[in-house]
Amino acid sequence: EYCSSLTSIELPSGLTSIGDGAFCGCISLTKIIVNKDNPNYISQDGILYNKDQKELICCPGGKKGKIVISASVNNFGYNVFDGCGSLTEIMVDGNNENYMSQDGMLYDKNQTKLKCCPGGKTGSIVIPASIVYILYDAFNSCGSLTEIIVDKNNPVYMSQDGILYDKNQKQLICCPGGKTGSIVIPASITSISEYSAFKGCSSLTEIM
């Protein structure tokens, strides 16, 4: 965890378990290799899966550009995309029965849950009207995202000045990591997301 200079690693044949978040913060890690004789894990394109490739365990933090999630994946491990600040697009095999992608973002198959916005996304994104649940770490590594826009017909979420709120504007859910200068918290806010509200906001200078 937080081995910031680690670029690749080979997991031995006898390995039987990996702790939650074992590779969190490994921002230079581009490739996880698994010994071919390991009966529990496998890697593809440097990404770590369990042996039958039904669970994606870790996408290395140093991955750049686009990745493709295979048709067999039906589950994701803990903080799978943590630190992936250069990942710009998550694609899903069209035969996957559990997940889909649109505009490079990862959703469940029915597009009711936003699983992940890639950390390398820049500028603005649009959250569709169908989304009723956003994972707490969906914007975890989005340090260059400046604006989150919510479709006006969405029944659960809204946005104002590019910041994500619940529909009644009672909770501040996420201020994009690429926001600069100052922001103003509305009078109606009664709670602020403990985990994701200001994650990665390194250029924010004032909260009013």
Image (cartoon, rainbow, N blue to C red):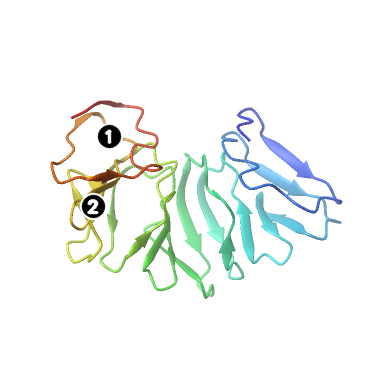
Question: Hey, which quadrant is residue 184 in on the image?
Answer: top left
Q: Residue drawn at (67%, 57%), measured in percent from left and top? A: 49
- Tag 2 secondary structure: strand
Give the residue type that dot 2 points to.
Ile
Q: Residue drawn at (34%, 45%), measured in percent from left and top? A: 193
Image position of 113 with respect to 140: above or below: below
Give the residue type that dot 1 points to.
Lys
Relative to residue 113, is residue 32 drawn left or right?
right
Image position of 182 with respect to 46: above or below: above
Question: Hey, which quadrant is residue 112 in on the image?
Answer: bottom left
**Label 2 crowding class (10 Å Cα cut-off): few <14, some 14-19, many 20+?**
some
**Label 1 crowding class (10 Å Cα cut-off): few <14, some 14-19, many 20+?**
many
Residue 132 place in picture, x, y as percent: 32, 65
Q: Residue drawn at (63%, 54%), measured in percent from left and top? A: 57
> Which residue is labeled 1 in the image?
179
Callout 2 touching callout 1 (CB < 8 Å): no
Residue at the extreme left of the image, as rendered: 187
Q: Residue drawn at (86%, 56%), measured in percent from left and top? A: 37
Tell me the CA gap for discs 2 and 1: 14 Å
- Quarter holding the C terminus is top left
Residue 64 place in picture, x, y as percent: 52, 43
- Quarter holding the N terminus is top right
The residue nearer to you, when weighing 86 against 172, is: 172
Number of residue marks: 2
Q: Name the mark on residue 149.
A: 2
- Tag 1 secondary structure: loop
Question: Hey, which quadrant is residue 187 in on the image?
Answer: top left
Q: Earlier in the sequence, mark 2 or mark 1?
A: 2
Residue at the extreme front of the image, as rendered: 190
Residue 123 place in picture, x, y as percent: 29, 42
Image position of 136 with respect to 50: above or below: above
Image position of 90 with respect to 175: above or below: below
